[in-house]
Amino acid sequence: MRQVNCGIAKNGNLVRVDMFLKEGRYSMVPIYVDLERLIDKLIID
């Protein structure tokens, strides 16, 4: 676990975070090793 901003995050089996730039906006997709299938959602700020 580690402190992030005003909270605590547990990274678990996070392998990497893929970042994409589209139309001037960044999107982040976390990739975990223990999932049976890859997630089909992304984080948009």
Image (spheres, rainbow, N blue to C red):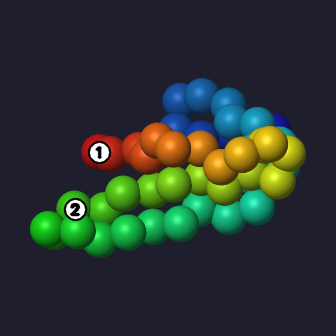
Q: Which residue is mark 2?
A: 25
Q: Which residue is mark 1?
A: 45
The reply to whether residue 33 is in sight is yes
Q: Are marks 1 and 2 in contact (CB under 8 Å)?
A: yes
Q: Nearer the viewer, residue 6 or 38?
A: 38
Q: Nearer the viewer, residue 9 or 22?
A: 22
Left or right: 7 with respect to 20?
right
Q: Quadrant of the C terminus?
A: top left
Q: Nearer the viewer, residue 17 or 1?
A: 17
Q: Looking at the image, which residue sits at the far front? A: 37
Query: Residue type at mark 1?
Result: Asp
Distance Cα–Cα, label 1 vs label 2: 8 Å
User: Where residue 31 appears, x then y in whole percent?
Assistant: 66, 55
The total number of labels drawn is 2
As drawn, the label of residue 27 is none
**Which quadrant of the view contains residue 15?**
bottom right
User: Where residue 19 appears, x then y in whole percent?
Assistant: 45, 67
Task: Please name the residue shown 52% across and 38% down the image.
Answer: 5
Q: Quadrant of the N terminus?
A: top right
User: Where residue 22 appears, x then y in whole percent?
Assistant: 23, 68
Task: Please name the residue shown 36% across and 57% down the image.
Answer: 27
User: Where residue 10 appears, x then y in whole percent?
Assistant: 76, 37
Upstream in the sequence, badge 1 or badge 2? 2
Task: Please name the residue shown 32% across and 45% down the image.
Answer: 44
